[in-house]
């Protein structure tokens, strides 16, 4: 009995449509655009795009209703994402780390607080810390591909401090990571020309 059930399951699975490179190539460009428009906000995987398509099928053209009903919605989403990534500029770890340091900077001190732009959010702001931490996380991913162990370690600590809303500590570790990244890349132009060589935190 168990053997019969297993054979039946195998037979049934053989009829389940699978997403292959051939599927992706067969999707009409118009349908790729429509999937991006109606389901582009959903993270692909586990047939979530296909489910989105089925829930919003009336929003799709008749051509795409036919094409995507064959199980190609997830493949179309993959094509759309690849197209978007291909056109996006690549940002390196140095730029991301420096941008995070700028965000994590405190308001000017030394008695000049009244000259500060009151509408600007500075390094201690929770939303600013979150934005900077996201940049540090992306910088960490880029740095790992470069093999700079010291920079990776410092960025890992910077990310952890950022997640803990400790913006001064995150900024300090990010500065150390930036110095290591600049040295490894042998860059001397901005922002590498002004990165501190010692680990003292100094408010601007």
Image: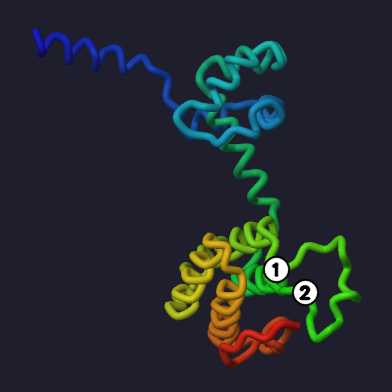
Q: Which residue is mark 1?
A: 123
Give percent across and percent down for residue 197.
Answer: 60, 92
Is 56 on the left or on the right of 113, as rendered? left
Nearer to the camera, 144 or 30: 144
Give percent across and percent down for residue 80.
Answer: 64, 37
The secondary element bearing badge 1 is classed as loop
Q: Which residue is mark 2?
A: 107
- Is the residue 153 above or below the residue 41 in the image? below
Classify residue 62 by image quadrant: top right
Q: Are marks 2 and 1 in contact (CB under 8 Å)?
A: yes
Give percent across and percent down for residue 103.
Answer: 71, 68
- Is the residue 89 above or below the residue 12 in the image? below
Question: Image point 56% across, 64% down: which residue?
Answer: 162
Classify residue 110 by image quadrant: bottom right
The circle on residue 93 is: none
Classify residue 198 by image quadrant: bottom right
Nearer to the camera, 180 or 10: 180
Question: Image point 71% across, 88% down: which residue?
Answer: 194
- Distance from disc 2 to disc 1, alpha carbons, whole Å, reads 7 Å
Q: What is the basis of the colouring in this image?
A: rainbow
């Amino acid at each position: 009995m168990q053997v019969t059930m297993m054979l039946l399951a195998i037979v049934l699975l053989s009829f389940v449509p699978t997403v292959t490179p051939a599927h992706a190539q067969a999707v009409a460009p118009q349908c790729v655009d429509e999937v991006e428009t109606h389901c582009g906000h959903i993270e692909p995987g586990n047939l979530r795009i296909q489910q989105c398509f089925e829930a919003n099928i009336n929003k799709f053209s008749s051509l795409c209703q036919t094409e995507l009903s064959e199980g190609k919605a997830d493949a179309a989403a993959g094509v759309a994402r690849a197209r978007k990534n291909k056109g996006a500029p690549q940002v390196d770890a140095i730029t991301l780390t420096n941008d995070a340091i700028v965000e994590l900077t405190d308001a000017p001190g030394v008695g000049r607080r009244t000259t500060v732009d009151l509408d600007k959010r500075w390094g201690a702001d929770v939303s600013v810390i979150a934005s900077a931490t996201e940049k540090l996380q992306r910088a960490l991913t880029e740095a790992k591909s470069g093999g700079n162990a010291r920079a990776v370690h410092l960025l890992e600590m910077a990310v952890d401090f950022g997640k803990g809303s400790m913006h001064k500590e995150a900024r300090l570790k990010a500065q150390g990571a930036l110095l290591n990244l600049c040295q490894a890349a042998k860059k001397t132009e901005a922002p590498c020309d002004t990165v501190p060589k010692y680990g003292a935190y100094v408010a601007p």
